[in-house]
Image (cartoon, rainbow, N blue to C red):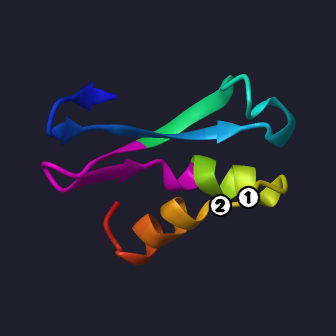
Amino acid sequence: GGVRRKPFYQIVVIDEKQRAKGVALETIGYWQPSKDDIKIDAARLKEWVAKGAKLTKAVSALLKTGKK
């Protein structure tokens, strides 16, 4: 998402089997690098990880930066 030179990324939960179709189960946050703005719903993230969700490398790296 976003516009030229101002990217905007949504952090979503997606079923591994449905990945090719791109149907998200839930949007739990976003990252806007141009404004250095990250928002992740920590409670929902913990719930999905408890259910067996795996974080991608990109989301893991965003969480390690300590910005929420």
Quarter of the view holding residue 29:
top left
Residue 49 tag number:
1
Residue numbers of the magenta segment: 30-43
Residue type indicated by callout 1: Val
Does the magenta portion include 49? no
Q: Which residue is mark 2?
A: 55
Residue 22 tag number:
none
Residue type indicated by callout 2: Leu
Q: Are marks 2 and 1 in contact (CB under 8 Å)?
A: yes
Left or right: residue 2 compared with residue 34: right
Q: Judge whether 17 appears above or below 65 on screen.
A: above
Label 1 packing within 10 angstroms: few (<14), some (14-19), many (20+):
few
Q: Which sits in the foreground, 8 or 38? A: 8
Which residue sits at x=26%, y=29%?
2
Secondary element type, mark 2? loop
Which residue sits at x=13%, y=49%?
35
Which residue sits at x=77%, y=54%?
53
